[in-house]
Amino acid sequence: MKSRRVGLWRIAALVFFLLVSNSAWAQNKSAYISNRLSDNVSVIDTVSNAITATIDVGIAPFGVAVSPNGSRVYVVNSDLDVTGGSVSVIDTASNSVIATIPVGSQPNGVAVSPDNATAYVTNPLDNTVSVIDTATNEVTATIGVGSEPSGVAVSPNGKAVYVTNFVDSSVSVIGPASETVTTTIPLGSGSGPVGVAVTPDSSAIYVADSISGDVSVICASSNTVIATIPLSGLEPVPDGVAISPDGKTAYVTDGSDNLVHVIDITTNQVTTAMPTSNGAFGVAVTADGKSVYVAAPPIDEVDAIDMATNSITAAIPVGREPVAFGLFIQPAVPTSPNFSIAPNASSETVKGGRSRKFSLRLESVNGFDGRVKLNCVGGPPGTRCSNFPRTIRVHGRTTASSGIRFPKDTAPGTYPITFSGQSSALTSTAWELFTVK
């Protein structure tokens, strides 16, 4: 399972999608596990960890995505025949396949727009992304991207689609309105990106680099890599990425070392590495953020991990070679009050020893009204943001202005600065690049 080719043995990341529903969203607490060699999907009740159903789908199912309202599950069927592949649509009320959508050759990943109107499917052998109208279940456009596209994710704000290109070691950014590639973000040479996930506030993108054995962090506002996070282990081969509902933690699977690496999103550092039973591919977090489920292909099991103790609470037998790459558990429905933070500019130029003004935009989400503590970190030792930490009230839209000063002897270069806001248990993070000349 350590092959780095996207095809027979490569699983792509995917996010979620759904047909529009005017009814209140219910939380589906099941996990849907694609079993590549069984050509079926195992359904796990994440409360009891019991198998409640087994659903036959297409040939060699790879990626899985549960819709935001939990009523549909989308399964990418790689179909080992190079002539094509498909997406199975499962109705969760009956646990039956209600539609099969033809797409490109050996598709890997699928993601759905927040408005549930469009699905995006990566086709690695065609170097394309299929665009599906979810109302008609038909492909309406085909977008050329990089070489061997693998993972795909749509930002929660609906403004961008991110596609990892395995051979090119890059990420293509697609504009949903234009259905064209608006920019291509280079990663490290020979990084081999596979999995991709976007933070709940749409500020950052986390990419699993399977060949270089690290994680690339992309700033959404500047479309640049702001951090590369090394992973522990003898030979890390990261594939899957999932982010906690509160946006504080990223989980990255490493099937080579049988680990799940836990990353603090505020500091972009690995805080711990949790052992799995044997192997690790797909990873997803329950809506309450208390448990992580990890597919273990070599032993035909799924591990349920308690995040409070970082220990396996159940090893659940499923079908043959489970991969479950993507959001195979319904994501949390964002109904609670929250806030977002973003810089007014994606980058600034400053001279060492001199102060440069900057401003941050803060906005209420779901009626948030409260006080937020702001902080900034990053840059060489001695870098300071004036009046930080500071606390301001956020109600509706608010702007916070301040200044940043780099030490006079700062070497010329570009430095990412992390801005964070915290209100009780709520946290939002953003980045801005400062170039010192």
Image (tube, rainbow, N blue to C red):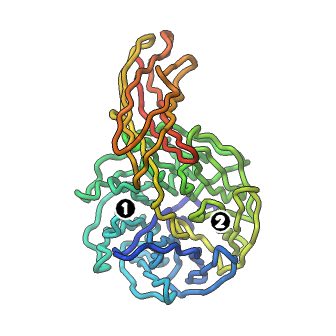
Q: Element at badge 2? A: strand
Circle on res. 294: 2
Q: What distance separates the C-alpha of mark 2 from that of mark 1?
A: 28 Å
For image coordinates 55% across by 66% down, the residue present is 325
| Nearer-the-camera pick, 375 or 276 | 375
Left/right of residue 273 with respect to residue 63 in the rendered view: right
Query: Residue 130: image x %, image y %?
Result: 33, 68
Read off the residue under disc 1. Answer: 127
Q: Quadrant of the C terminus?
A: top left
Q: Is residue 78 visible?
A: no
Amino acid under disc 1? Asn
For image coordinates 43% across by 75% down, the residue present is 82
Q: Are marks 2 and 1 in contact (CB under 8 Å)?
A: no
Q: In this rendering, which labeled residue sits more in front, label 2 or label 1?
A: 2
Amino acid under disc 2? Val
Q: Quadrant of the N terminus?
A: bottom right
